[in-house]
Image (cartoon, grey):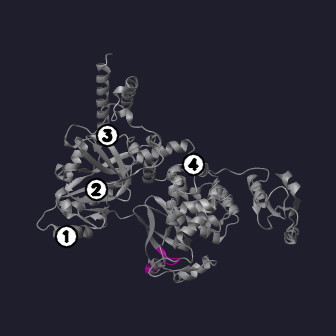
Amino acid sequence: MTQSQPKDRISKLRELINEYRYAYHVLNESIMSEAAADSLKHELSQLESAHPELITPDSPTQRVAGVALDKFAKIEHKVPMISLNDVFDEKEVEAWIGRMDKLLPGSTHEFLCDIKMDGLACAIVYQDGVLHQAITRGDSRVGEDVTMNVRTIENIPLRLRGTGPFTIGRTEIRGEIVMLKKDFDELNARREAEGQPTFKNPRNLAAGTIRQLDPKLVAERPLTFIGYDMLRDNPDDIMSNSEMYESLKAIGIATSGQHKTFENLADVMTYVHELDQTRTALPFNTDGLVIKVNDRQQFSKLGVVGKSPRGAVAYKYAAEEATTVVRDIVISIGRTGAATPVAVFDPVDVAGTTVQHASLHNADEIARKDIRVGDTVIIYKAGDIIPQVERVLTELRPKSTKTFDYQDELKRQYPELEFERVGSDVVYRVKGASGPVLLKRALEHFASRGALDIDTLGEKNVVALVDAGLVSDFADIYALKKEDLLNLERFADISATKLIEAIHQKKNPPLERFVYALGIRHVGTQTAIDLVHHFESLDKLSHATIDELRNVEGVGEVVAESVVAWFADEDNQILLRKFNELEVSPVYKKQTGALTGKKFVVTGTLETMGRDEAAEKIRGAGGTFQSSVGKDTDYLVAGGKVGGSKLKKAEQYGTKVISEKEFIELL
């Protein structure tokens, strides 16, 4: 083969592979089998290996490139990626159109509608047709550079198709990175077969995946990009949104396939209702429909109000609703010291999942809706995600119900704490404790020896991390990079490396230690062990009802309420999702050993070990460590300088008293 022959062959292979990609991902057609396409990619890879001088950045073989990053660079958007205002019914859509008519008197409007996808918004910049940069939405003005990860997404062209105007100069494509339902189900099926934990939902997985620092890991997960907008330096390049959608398709960018244009409100609303009936059959998750002015010059003239464009709105579909009975209202103390009430109700299916608690937000919200224990309430999912109480069905209210007295409940549930409500703040907070102070205490506990036992993450380092703003919750420690630490006075290269390594060694901690580390009120070391051995997974524990929790030996009403309140708190739900995205996976191991089923109390001073070490040895051998002698205690281990009270109780209950030597022999 002459030099020109491999060059020609490589060029033709790239062209045919890109045609296959375009037909498969954009036209939803297949010009050859996947196996045949793989064979062509293999040949191309071999030719490029033999002729590396012929490799180009936009070759189909160059999707996974580069090494793992330490962190993502911050990039400012050329045009902010602002969000849309929500509307919920026809009257609100009509009012939106009325506002536009006042701003553009005498104008007629054509509307483009497209489904609103539930994924991660991203902007992809092409320079002269070649993929140049990919930036997450971020705070709308500044996002993160995820270019290397986005290159791995198969349906994103590395070079735009054709030779038209959009392949010249700067072209920015905006869209949503999603994981299709079928890909999500197949991925979870594989993980389940391999004995790995499954992922919760496609949206969180897509968002967590695109923020992984290693492109190779991203390439292993099937993500899809669906475009919905295109920006050019010259606005006249694209006169309408319908034209823009056709251009996206022509240059090789996949769209939802659901966009349509309409000339009046009646036709728009007909389409809104049609999609509401069929949206569950779409290949991706969605919670609404985007309605925008089709004329892009009109859209530009309408401008922006607040943080949203005047020329577009997001029609949110009504969430699925269900009724249930409130069995309790418990109060959770969040990481900022805020006291958040949580309604605990009979389990009910809403929008495809079983829910049994919902945040009531604050005392004023409870009073406004007059929610009481015993009430029948309507539950819905805001944005198809977070359970909310819509209203009380007072017609079904039992006569015995009482108005919920928030201050009395704070005193009953937290007798050792004082609360205050400052100025116009609607939230009660722990008196004298700020968010950073509480976070420092909680993080010290999380890293302590009895919890995750993270070496070198002691009080001083915790204070340094919190004061520097590097962590806002427990999960943030797993996202720390050495460069972050080197900016602090306390850290040099070796100490920073040690801390990062110590943290990452605890990404798969024993589940009982992890549960204890979370700092759930009233859940000590032994209670955490009892809960974990009963439920055997964090997911089952997080969905346990108060009745199910009370069935655990040693767990009463107070502990059960505290556990339910912790897992119902929205901040804690976000925290657990973040752990999952950072691939922190606690491990459950069934405890068996010489002391399985036996219960021990230790009194006096032991010569060979401290009391905490003795407790750990007991639990490690499958036994239960108790703080006081009870009817169910099997052994009292008596060391030196023994007090009389525990010996008297042991005699009273017939508990066997053994020496330290006998205890070691049992171990």
The correct choice, above or below, for 169 with respect to 401 in the image is: above
Residue 237, percent across and down?
Answer: 17, 49
The correct choice, above or below, for 162 with respect to 171 in the image is: above
Disc 4: which residue = 493
Callout 4 touching callout 2 (CB < 8 Å): no
Which amino acid does the dot numbered 4 rest on? Asp
Q: Nearer the viewer, mark 1 or mark 2?
A: 2
Instruction: For marks 1 and 2, give the CA distance.
Output: 27 Å
Q: Answer whether residue 370 is magenta in the image.
A: yes
Instruction: For marks 1 and 3, give the CA distance.
Output: 40 Å
Residue at (84% x, 55% y) in the render? 608
- Disc 1 packing (10 Å; few <14; some 14–19; many ≥20): few
Residue 192, percent across and down?
Answer: 54, 45
Residue 423, percent across and down?
Answer: 46, 82
Residue at (32% x, 21% y) in the render? 6
Disc 3: which residue = 157
